[in-house]
Amino acid sequence: MPLDGVAIARGGCEYSIVMRRIESAHNRVFKELSRLLTSSGIKKEGRALVAGSKPVGEALRRFPSRCRAWISAGEDAPPPSEAPAHLEWLCLASALHRALDVFGTGAPLLLIESPPILPWSTAQGFPDGCSLLVPFQDPENVGAVVRSALAFGAAQVILLAESAHPYHPRAMRASSGAVLYAPLRAGPSIAELPADLPVVPLSAEGRPLSAFVFPLSFGLLAGLEGPGLPAAWRERAVSIPIRSEVESLNAAVAASVALYAWSRARGGVR
């Protein structure tokens, strides 16, 4: 792989950075980067791709030690002056960059380490407040609901075994980078949640959310996209009333509405 020393101006001074040129889809590094477009690849590699100027800037500012490589199409977009000195510059052929840039931004991507998500077990119970239980298999739903959980003050987000990886590119984008600093935990399958756990399930059928009094400490659980909740949880579910001509809400939207209702009830938002 060709290596070039490139001089870049930073703070009125020049410094040298190693740039790697990658021009073949058979390149080992490119193949490794391509695997980061899937949840399984992110989990296996322990790394993730960040796209979009705001999430990339946020990652550089908040987590410089986790940033590993700046990935650009060509040489016209070098790492910014605030980039950590250890950051590697991967200069990809345009076609290869487009293959990784799944949103077509054309902007540089950032390769980061994805820290392990600490496990959570049902024996630990829930801290005060709302713990959001996420079984969503759609990465965009995962990202959107993590963003809502942060916005409304959830104590933690517990990703159930069914969940897509929160660092999937589509989850990252839907969260606007919120997954990078959300309090994430890894939980069991939705089928393994015990019936005596203080869970507030969301379903199209159930008691109206507007008349529900949230407990001090609980887990908020929306069902999987499509099949919804297991039957045992539907029997004690709360629902969000909607117009009859609409069958149901998107799972992430329903969870976000419930998070807002809980936050408002506790005085978190007005």
Image (cartoon, rainbow, N blue to C red):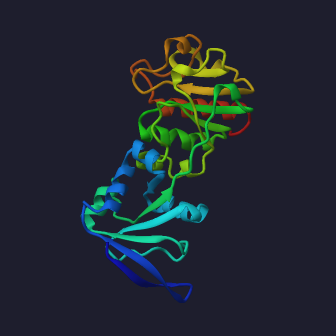
Whether residue 125 is visible, yes or no, is: no
Q: Residue at coordinates 60% horizontally, 46% vertically from top-left?
A: 182
Viewer-side residue, 148 vs 64: 64
Q: Is residue 19 left or right of residue 99?
A: right
Whether residue 252 is visible, yes or no, is: yes
Question: Which quarter of the figure has residue 6?
Answer: bottom left
- Above or below, 10 relative to 116: below
Viewer-side residue, 7 vs 3: 3
Q: Residue at coordinates 63% horizontally, 33% vertically from top-left?
A: 120
Q: Is residue 267 left or right of residue 186?
A: right
Q: Residue at coordinates 64% horizontally, 29% vertically from top-left?
A: 121
Q: Is residue 35 left or right of residue 50?
A: left
- Above or below, 228 relative to 133: above
Image quarter where the C terminus lies is top right
Question: Which quarter of the figure has residue 248?
Answer: top left
Residue 116: x %, y % from top left: 56, 46
Residue 103: x %, y % from top left: 34, 54
Residue 43: x %, y % from top left: 46, 45
Q: Residue at coordinates 62% horizontally, 14% vertically from top-left?
A: 195
How many numbered marks does the figure carry?
0
- Specify the farthest residue to the bottom: 13
Viewer-side residue, 158 vs 186: 186
Question: Which quarter of the figure has residue 66?
Answer: bottom right
Image quarter where the N terminus lies is bottom left
